[in-house]
Image (cartoon, grey):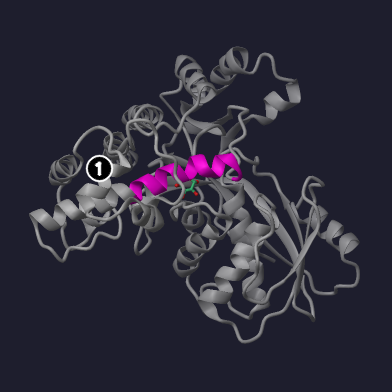
Amino acid sequence: MNPFTPLLDQFHHAYPGHSRVRLCHAPGRVNLIGEHIDYSGLPVLPMTVNRFIRVAYALREDDQLCMASADEAFPRAAFSIRTPVPPSSPGAWENYCKAAVEGINRGFKPIRARGMDMLIAGDIPKAAGLSSSSALVVACALAYLDAVGLRLEEDLSRIELAELLAEAEQYVGTRGGGMDQAIILLGEPGHACAIHFHPIRVECVPLFPGHSFVVLNSGVKAAKSGEALHRYNEGPLSCRLLRALVERQAREEFDDSIVLERLGDLWFGDLCLTHREVEGLVDRALPGERVPLRQASAILGIDEHEIRRRWLGDLKEPDGGFPLKARARHQLSEYRRVERARDMLLANDPRGFGELMNASHDSCAGDYAVSCEELDRLVAVARGAGAIGARLTGAGFGGCTVNLVPDDTVSEFLEQVKKAYYAAWPAERARDAVLVVEAADKAGYAG
Ligand code: GLA
């Protein structure tokens, strides 16, 4: 059955009287490798998944945007599309739609805009690290573009929209990079995509024949709101301090006028350093394994309040200082793994790719500290059950792992994982926790 058919029926029930109803959709994504480095401007290698947010919408005569969900867990919401659109309380689902509206209003300053009635449905597991929230932002943005009279690929490119929405999603309080919006808008069926940033460039590479990516849910919710939002932001915020210290070192060693907007500028900007040169520079920029705020202030010649105001906000200082050496080790090594993983895809070397996935998990869990006990256990179970690569995917702290498994061993693999990890789970929940994913089509309009 066409997945939009029940949505359309529900739409007419929820909002009677519309004659012209339009449809759009946005897939979720799974990141294969390149975790927590997009916000440093470093490349990543995700793919879309065949799970979607689907939206049925119709234009209104006034400026109200009314949202309803097919899932009763999400209450109806309505707001005026006029800028500035004030956010609802943290964690409210309409904030993702508000983020899209506010982003498009600011980016395009549309002269005319109409409100909408929207009904939203989705089958991307929530709070699982598969980007259901960015898919919601993208789907709402596609609908709202229609309401302001802008046509995707004619009035603005997919790349422009991805860049705009990466910025726009910061409205909800996360300090993420641009991976999710880019893969959702630019992914290709059957392909993983190497994505570079500033500006976005995408190279889609065919997936391994005879192998599957299996996504396993740890059962630990990884919602990016509330406390989890703070934990996620620790990465981007401490990378800002890292960037400032490395910039100071680069000015001392090369040229006093150097500006590093992000760590990635070391490789891609005017500097064009090699991996080895970057490693040396970063090493010299950091006095020890940990950098206390006091010491950072002395090095930078900027007082602690100002450092907080510019980069750290209210990020809590851990005992002994910020673990910047370990953060940097992950950034640098993960970037190298992404480059090599892309080469392994091109060379059709799944074993080599799997080893890089394993190393990525170990770096995420060790140096970057974004794993948790359950994810580590699930990764160990999967490796024991025959995955040739297993790692956490997405922001971490819960959610899913992604596993590379030869097709002829997938059933055996799933049997073993079920016994070892999901044995105590109710059958339906255990069944829903396992997805053998395919790279689906990118976000767009239907019909
Ligand atoms: C979230 C963010 C992304 C990225 C990942 C971690 O999904 O939205 O930008 O930082 O976490 O790789």
Side of 50 where 237 appears, left or right? left
Q: Nearer the viewer, residue 212 or 293?
A: 293
Q: Is residue 170 left or right of residue 357?
A: right
- Residue 392: image x %, image y %? 47, 32
Report the residue at 54% width, 44% height from top.
229
Three-letter amino acid code at disc 1?
Gln
Residue 326 x/y as whole percent: 30, 34
Circle 1 is placed at which residue position?
295
Is 157 left, or right, of 348 in this rendering?
right
Is residue 246 a member of the stretch shown in magenta? no
Task: Decide which of 340, 40 is in the foreground and name it.
Answer: 40
Q: Quadrant of residue 443?
A: bottom right
Q: Secondary structure at mark 1?
A: helix
Quadrant where the C terminus sits is: bottom right
Residues packed near mark 1 inside 10 Å, few (<14), some (14 to 19) or many (20 plus): some
Vertical relation: 305 (above or below) 275: below
Q: Residue at x 62, y 34 (%)?
A: 221
Q: Residue at x 17, y 46 (%)?
A: 278
Q: Which stretch did the figure color magenta?
A: 225-240
Residue 29 picture location, percent across and down? 53, 46
